[in-house]
Image: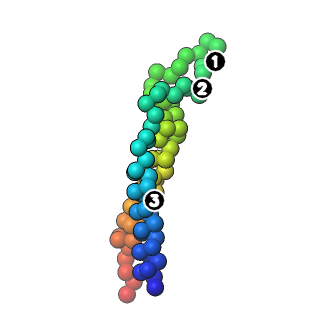
């Protein structure tokens, strides 16, 4: 009975993964305006860290969430493989 539950969960995860990968437009090609503007006498930061964070959490948020799920599944799998069996 447990194997059927695992098979159903695995198929559901794979279906969600395939559905997410079939989205044709992962990010728009148009440049999004910055959501922040420097105050008077200040300038924009010269590093691209803020721009990368803005892009990840606006245009690529779905891909970011899928990556988080995949990495979580890999971590759980690694812990399961590395566990000691109690005799």
Q: Which mark is residue 16?
A: 3
- Is residue 14 shown above or below 8? above
Residue 53 visible to an observer of this rendering:
no
Number of numbered labels in the structure image: 3
Label 3 vs 2, first from the N-terminus: 3
Looking at the image, residue 36 lies above or below residue 80: above
Q: Secondary structure at mark 2?
A: loop
Which sits earlier in the primary sequence, circle 1 or circle 3?
A: 3
Left or right, 40 with respect to 19, comes to right
How many C-alpha atoms fall within 10 Å of the one at disc 2: few (<14), some, or many (≥20)?
few
Q: CA distance from mark 1 to mark 3?
A: 43 Å
Is disc 1 in contact with disc 3, using a CB cutoff of under 8 Å? no
The alpha-carbon separation of the residues under discs 1 and 2 comes to: 9 Å
Q: Say which residue appears at 43% left-offset and 62% top-offset.
A: 15
Q: Mark 3 or mark 2, which is nearer to you?
A: 3
Q: Residue furthest right?
A: 40
Residue 27, percent across and down? 45, 37
User: Residue 7 sits in which quadrant?
Assistant: bottom left
Rendered image: mark on residue 36: 2
Residue 24: name its quadrant. Answer: top left
Q: Residue furthest left?
A: 81
Residue placed under numbered mark 1 in the picture:
39
User: Is 18 above or below relative to 51?
Assistant: below
């Amino acid at each position: 009975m447990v194997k059927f539950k695992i098979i159903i969960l695995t198929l559901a995860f794979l279906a969600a993964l395939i559905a997410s990968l079939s989205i044709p437009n992962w990010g728009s090609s148009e440049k999004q305006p910055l959501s922040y503007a420097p105050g008077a006498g200040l300038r924009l930061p010269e590093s691209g860290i803020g721009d990368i964070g803005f892009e990840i959490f606006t245009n690529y948020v779905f891909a970011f969430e899928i990556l988080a799920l995949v990495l979580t599944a890999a971590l759980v799998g690694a812990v399961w493989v590395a566990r000691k069996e109690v005799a």
